[in-house]
Image (cartoon, grey):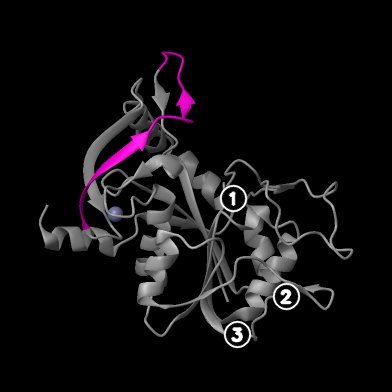
Amino acid sequence: MDAISVTALAARFPARSFISKAEFDEYIRENRDRVDARYRHELEFASTKPEISWPGTCAPCLRPTTYTSRTKGGERLPDGRVLPNWREELACDCEDRINARGRAMLHFAESVTGLLPAMRVLAFGPSTPVSRRIGQTATLIHRTRMLVAGGAYRLDLPDACVQLALAPDYLNHVPPLDAALAELRRVLARGGQLVFTVPFRVDLANTISRTDDLPHVNGLLPTYYGASIHDIGWDVLSRLRKAGFAGASAYSYWSEELGYLGPFNIIITGTA
Ligand SMILES: [Zn+2]
């Protein structure tokens, strides 16, 4: 593949966005054959080997790549083959070997959000190749967890000071989810975007939370918990709107060429 077509491919993030479960369900009804054919195609990749590989294009690295995916931890099929956990295990062969979830997050930030050098970015979680690369383009402000100050869930940041907040597989670990969303809205400038992934449950209208038995800190739920305590469903979009976001969408993305396999890969955005 030549450089121009690689660029063209990377320019567009291969996704369809939804604003509600009803819209998603309708899309699935109308495209059932396509969704099923895609899954059957993915099943052909299932293997008894520990690792599989095939050629493709890494969008954030903007180059041809060889994808590899370990099958360990994947879904074992009745015939003994294993379907990889694409989201976590499907890596490009570039220096950082970024998995599908990370590459999609980078690609999304670059092509949908539009990263700019002057953009101030708030990133949750530890430093990763994804956050480092974002920091090469934009100005990164790191905060690893929500802070508790003055009896409230509060980030040590002024109002409307960031243009992009990235939370990769983070918010499902934050017990006071609505308080966190409201706080993220507070620090985002108008038009700014919260972009996050969680192990999203496309089948759930309402998020299932397991916060009742958690220990409290200063009378409040902890701001971060090691185990995932929310199975996040479609109500997260209305919860974003309730938290003050002007818009909220779930982007379902898929591309074999770009190494985004798996039936329902979701990136969620809240636009301030
Ligand atoms: Zn790459």
Query: Are the residues at dot 2 and dot 3 in contact (C-beta closer than 8 Å)?
Result: no
Indicate which disc, 1 or 2, sits on the residue closer to the N terminus.
Answer: 1
Position of the C terminus, as image quadrant, is bottom right
Residue 81 horizontal/vertical position (percent): 39, 19
Query: Are the residues at dot 1 and dot 2 in contact (C-beta closer than 8 Å)?
Result: no
Query: Which is more toward the observer, 262 or 100?
Result: 100
Q: In the rendered structure, which amino acid carries the disc numbered 2?
A: Arg
Q: Residue furthest left?
A: 2
Residue 196 horizontal/vertical position (percent): 53, 60
Give me the residue at 64% from left, 85% from top: 159
Mark 1 burial class by Cα count in 10 Å: few <14, some 14-19, many 20+:
some
- Relative to residue 130, is residue 81 depicted above or below? above
Instruction: Determine whether, in the image, residue 8 is placed left or right of residue 224.
Output: left
Q: CA distance from mark 2 to mark 3?
A: 13 Å
- Relative to residue 45, is residue 127 depicted above or below? below
Give me the residue at 37% from left, 52% from top: 98
Q: Is residue 65 magenta?
A: yes
Residue 156 horizontal/vertical position (percent): 67, 80
Badge number at residue 160: 3
Give me the residue at 69% from left, 73% from top: 183
Instruction: Determine whether, in the image, residue 169 is placed left or right of residue 255.
Output: right
What's drawn in magenta, residue-wise?
Answer: 63-80
Mark 3 burial class by Cα count in 10 Å: few <14, some 14-19, many 20+:
some
Q: In the rendered structure, which amino acid carries the disc numbered 1?
A: Lys
Report the image quarter containing ligand 1. Answer: bottom left
Q: CA distance from mark 1 to mark 3?
A: 30 Å
Q: Is residue 263 magenta?
A: no
**Which-is-in-front pick, marks 1 and 2?**
2
Q: Residue furthest top?
A: 79
